[in-house]
Image (cartoon, rainbow, N blue to C red):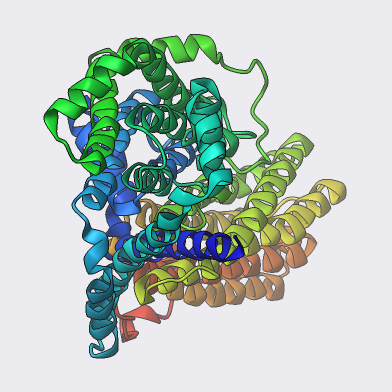
Amino acid sequence: MWVYVCGLIGGMGLLLYGMYVLSEGLQKIAGANLRNVLSSLTQNRFVAMVIGALVTILFQSSTATTVILVGLASASVITLKQTLGVILGADIGTTVTAQLIALKVTEIALPIVGIGATIIFFTKRDRYKRIGQAIIGFGLLFLGLKIMAETMYPLRDEPAFLSLMTTVADNPLLAIIVAAVFTFLIHSSAAAVGIIMIFAIQDLVTLHSAIYLLFGANIGTSFTALLSSLGSNREAKRVAIAHFLFKLVGVLIFLPFVTPFAALMQALTPNIGFQVANVHTFFNVGIALLFIPFTEQCARFLTWLVPEEQVVDIELKPRYLDYQLISTPSIAMGLASKEITRFSDEVVKMACRIRDLFETNDPDELEKMMKSEEKVDCLSRATKSYLAMILRQPLSTPEFNRCMGLIHITTDLEHIGDVIDKKINRLAEKKIDNCCDFSVEGWEEITIMHERVCTLVERTHHAFINNDLEVAQQAIRLAPKIRGMERELRRLHIHRLAMGVQRSEGTSSIHLDLINSYLTISEHVRNIALAIAEEVIGARPMAPTSEDYPRFDDERICTLS
């Protein structure tokens, strides 16, 4: 008996590992555009269904596809209506593996593994290695099924096993529950369907029993998405519930017609393997055709079923980071980019409010600035932790560079917030407490530098949002000019001190520290622009030119205003 148990466990392990390797290899080949495809090509419900089928073939699991959809919906990357078509297509895509098993692809599993290994060992290009990895995963998947089939064959003569299968077969509800729980535990409907097909091919269950087991497997595949939606926003919960309801309603519709359904499958082909595979295909295609015309009505029903929470959004909590998608780095980095955009926008607002802070002498403005910095601090820490987890995944070189670039950007945005909070806010407090004002000339110079720094910050923010290399390069060239400006403004201020300008004397330390803080901000922004150009976009670094380091004189400072 232990021989059978070890064979089943080993075969299942090989099957699941093969699916993991196949999915990982295919994601590396096509994953970079996966998020964009899901968000941009799913506006039409029928196109969304096709995309869902193709993505599920890529992942070899409708469960994985639905978990990704939950994450994207949670991050507001794609709407509920868009996800419904993808979910229905995913259910169709998961039937491909069953048809391949019926075609006895398991018999050529070893040659497939050999071909994949040959490609990996005799090529140096990453792209071909990924193709080889996907081929090996494909072969291991079917090799695991082959081992399980060979292990199960002698079980036809085991009375205890036959008694167990008879008990399950005679109780449709029990068969559905057992298959649903098993599918949830292994997180793969394709693997569960493959095992059910082996049972049928080995004459361990009848076609009727296999149909009930398939119904359970189809319901069980939705449990993982339901679990992953816990703690997510309402949109994510609606996506997960939609997948569960599609499957449950489909089973309830088909359940009274199991006998004629089985008769139809037997009339189409005498091969029991194809009969089971066709049941799985007909069931999921039937669900898709039934619900696809009513996706808009389904979306309204789900919105009614899971209403919006009547609570204020917590600004200090990440909105887009989804830890369920860490294993899909291309999508996870896209979500991290959206979170960075969120607090980068806050940094832009903080930088542009600095002048108002010193002009109004309003303590309420100080309070707003401190709250903004707290938000930036919390979100940047969470995002860096999220990106660090992505770095632990298998990444291609461009993915690794992009992830490192996002970490550098996050770090510099956090530093800008710290400069504003720990230096500029304290300078504003000092100015308010001392009831002092800048000289007319000094305030004009600070205003000029403020405007130049705000321009730099806004351009860099725009470059990040739009992946705009040209704007990033403009920001890189603009930053050193602020260093020259800081030197010239310091010289002009010291000149006024020498001339005995009273207001300049009263605000000297505040003035000099403020323009130095502006300079520090500009250096962090230049670091961000460099990371955007070199790591996020992937351009070569630019060599500095003489134009990047100009000298300023009084006349030029005046023209900048």
Task: Report if residue 553 is visible in the image.
Answer: no
Q: Position of residue 372 (x, y in %)?
A: 67, 44
Question: In this rendering, is residue 446 above or below 43?
Answer: below
Nearest the viewer among 375 and 388 is 388
Residue drawn at point x = 57 percent, y = 51 percent: 351
Residue drawn at point x = 49 percent, y = 71 percent: 404
Q: Position of residue 460 (x, y in %)?
A: 41, 59
Q: Is residue 47 left or right of residue 310?
A: left
Nearest the viewer among 289 and 346 is 289
Quadrant assignment for the N terminus = bottom right
Quadrant assignment for the C terminus = bottom left
Nearest the viewer among 166 and 83 is 166
Nearest the viewer among 100 and 539 is 100
Question: In this rendering, is residue 390 above or below 484?
Answer: above
Q: Is residue 382 left or right of residue 138?
A: right
Task: Report if residue 532 is visible in the image.
Answer: yes
Residue reaching furthest right? 433
| Total numbered badges shown on the rendered structure | 0
Residue reaching furthest left? 268
Q: Position of residue 356 (x, y in %)?
A: 62, 42
Q: Is residue 89 left or right of residue 252?
A: left
Residue drawn at point x = 22 percent, y = 59 percent: 105
The quadrant in which residue 161 appears is top right
Q: Position of residue 49 (x, y in %)?
A: 23, 32
Residue drawn at point x = 74 percent, y = 45 percent: 370
Question: In this rendering, is residue 356 above or below 410?
Answer: above
